[in-house]
Image (cartoon, rainbow, N blue to C red):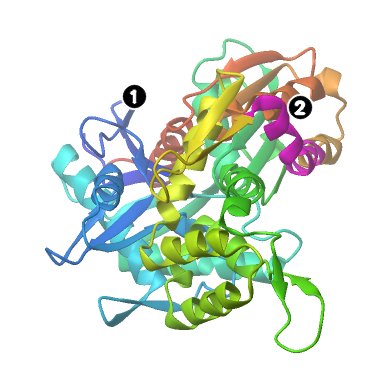
Amino acid sequence: MKTTAIGVDFGTSNSTAAFVDGAEPVLVPLEGGRFDLPSAVFFDFETGSRKYGRSAIDGYVGDAEGRFMRALKSILGTSLEDDSTYIAGKRVAFSDIIAGFIRSIKATAEEFRGTEIDTVVAGRPVHFVDDDRKADRQAEQTLERIFHAAGFRDVAFQYEPIAAALDYEQTVEREEIALIADLGGGTSDFSVVRISPDGRTRTDRGDDILATGGVHVGGTDLDRLANLRKVMPELGLDSRLRRDFGDGLITIPRHVFVSLSTWQRIHLLYDRAILREVKDYLRLSNSPHLIERLQHVLEERLGHKLALEVEAAKIGLTDAPTARIGLDVIEQGLGVEIDRAEFDAIIAAETRAIRRALDGTLADAGLGPEAVSAIFLTGGTTAVPVVRQALLEAVPQAAVVEGDRFGSVGIGLALEAERRFGPAR
């Protein structure tokens, strides 16, 4: 019997959707046969349409006139949550942009499933905001309103690492204490869960969830740090400016470079006031050729292209000792090399924060590392070698289980949707 309930993992970098068909969870092919959909939106000014996923990235990289946005989930729990932006001369709320993205997932799932889908269990990080319960509740409430605006009647939430645990539980043959590590684009989340074949049949799992924890550090933070260290100096970061009045030099302000390295803030720089500020930098700069590059990037709206190059280099370092960050969109032949040891040093503080969150979750469960039977890895950031090493060193005796990096949470959310809402009514 078909079900009207679906699981949706709306991620910072990628999103998935799944439902249960009979006894089996099924991922929805959201784009061109691919199950993972990049969480990206492109407003095509030439056609007046919105494009999502890889189509959005292709439209932007292909130099179509328009506006590109990515990592929108990261606005939840921030001052941008209730804000809006101008697109083609019209003010559009960020929440409406996210709702449109989720609505496209719903429509694709309905077409694939052949039935209307009005109920969803959506994933959420353990913490939208670290150490601020009020802001965290507000972020979930905002996301709930967004899912309703996207066309869902009934909306429930489950922690993303718990959803991943439900996926892993489908494979076990005996009771285990599992540490679920879900490291995505925006957050690193952990749960310690008692799982078993018998657990697959139980609806109430409260006693089996021993602890949850996490930290607001993910893959986009690693991108930002690499971008700041390797790319932004080529655009004038840390260069010196003459004073308008008086003698001596000052260091150029960092805020433009920080925003240009932060996925969800890049589009905020395409503003006349920012361009006027950069022209002042150019007038006073001791390195005008660098500031001319910065001006070119902002005038031509190249920020996301640079971020995509940094992300590609990060991914390349998974299997290779060195990678090149190509900057040909600025100047032909321009680029910077980065090696794995340098990247590891750049993200060292974030790696330590992730490890502290893992250790804290184990401590909250009242367990030592030796009690963990298996560590289940999901989320794209678990592929970063130094981060992966930190995770495995925390529970050295645990069996390492690889989940579907982009699909495990969506599958677990579908299982949760089936448990909570059952078959079609």
Residue 354 lies in magenta, yes or no? yes
**In the figure, is residue 328 to the left or right of 210?**
left
User: Magenta part mainly helix, strand or loop?
Assistant: helix
Write down the quadrant of residue 26 in the picture.
top left
As displayed, is residue 151 above or below residue 6? below
Q: Which mark is residue 322?
A: none
As displayed, is residue 357 above or below residue 169? below
Q: Mark 2 is on which residue type?
A: Ala
First in sequence: mark 1 vs mark 2: 1
**Quadrant location, the N terminus:** top left
Q: Nearer the viewer, residue 76 or 141?
A: 76
Residue identifier under label 1: 24
- Residue that appears at 58% across and 48% down: 231
- Give the percent coordinates (x, y) of residue 398: 74, 15
Mark-to-mark CA distance, 1 and 2:
34 Å
- Mark 1 or 2: in front is 2
**In the figure, is residue 152 to the left or right of 367?**
left
Write down the quadrant of residue 381 in the picture.
top right
- Give the percent coordinates (x, y) of residue 334: 47, 41
Q: Nearer the viewer, residue 346 or 240?
A: 240
Q: Residues within 10 Å of mark 1 (few under 14, many from 20)?
A: few
- Residue that appears at 72% across and 40% down: 346
**In the figure, is residue 223 to the left or right of 145?**
right
- Residue that appears at 28% across and 35% down: 28
Give the magenta range: 339-356
- Give the percent coordinates (x, y) of residue 37: 34, 41
Q: Residues within 10 Å of mark 2 (few under 14, many from 20)?
A: some
Q: Secondary structure at mark 2?
A: helix
Residues under numbered marks 1 and 2 in contact, where contact means CB atoms less than 8 Å apart: no
Residue identifier under label 2: 390
Q: Secondary structure at mark 1?
A: strand
Q: Nearer the viewer, residue 86 or 206?
A: 86
